[in-house]
Image (cartoon, rainbow, N blue to C red):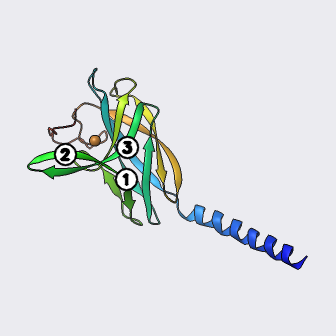
Amino acid sequence: MDMVLKRLAIAGCLLISASAAAQTGPVDIKDAWARATPGKAENGAAYLTIVSPTPDRLVAVSSPAAKKAGLHTMTMDGGVMKMRPADGVDVPANQPVTLKPGGTHIMLQGLKEPLQAGKSFPLILTFEKAGQREVEVAVEKPGAMGPEGHAGMQMQMPGHR
Ligand SMILES: [Cu+2]
């Protein structure tokens, strides 16, 4: 009898601490955007900023807009920018992590339809600790360098169409 009560008490504590932890770690995802893609392009890329009050790690992405979504990093290889898949992106506590053109990005492969400027599509991010978050990605003009209002210079990137 005593053992049962003890177990119940322990289970209750675990529940309380789990929900408290969930409340202290809301991951904030801001400025999710993508470039419009030309009619025949099969691939696109999405960018965003992640802020987390506790250390976390983005481990997976998916979107109903593409057959496959994944994390990519850019590296210089003999003077050529190359993309390579990444298995995760670390998010340090209270330090915004920005995925942007020329750097780490979310690759969308096998677009179901072209990304059209002015439209948006859902993107699901999976974090190691915070779990899944869904955001709406705003589609900006082709060649945009940031979300609306932050557009800067244009840059050509081999490998990205
Ligand atoms: Cu890529």
* Res 116 → quadrant: top left
Disc 2: which residue:
82
Lower sequence index among marks 2 and 3: 3
Q: Is residue 29 above or below residue 161?
A: below
Mark 1 → mark 2, Cα distance in angstroms: 16 Å
Q: Is residue 51 above or below residue 135?
A: below
Q: Position of residue 146 (x, y in %)?
A: 27, 42
Mark 1 → mark 3, Cα distance in angstroms: 8 Å
| Disc 3, SS | strand
Q: Position of residue 45 (x, y in %)?
A: 31, 38
Nearer to me, 152 or 44 = 44
Residue found at the very far bottom of the displayed protein: 2
**Residue type pointed to by label 3:** Gly
**Residue type pointed to by label 1:** Asp
- Establish whether ligand 1 lies closer than 8 Å to the Cβ of label 2: no
Q: Which mark is residue 87?
A: 1
Residue found at the very far top of the displayed protein: 39
Nearer to me, 33 or 77 = 77
Q: Residue at x 48, y 50 (%)?
A: 126
Q: Are marks 1 and 3 in contact (CB under 8 Å)?
A: no
> Badge 2 local density, few (<14 within 10 Å), some, or many (20+)?
some
- The quarter of the image that holds ligand 1 is top left
Q: Which mark is residue 70?
A: 3
Q: Is residue 21 left or right of residue 80?
A: right
Nearer to me, 51 or 92 = 92
| Disc 2, SS | strand
Q: Is residue 6 left or right of residue 140?
A: right
Q: Position of residue 149 (x, y in %)?
A: 28, 41
Q: Quadrant of the C terminus?
A: top left
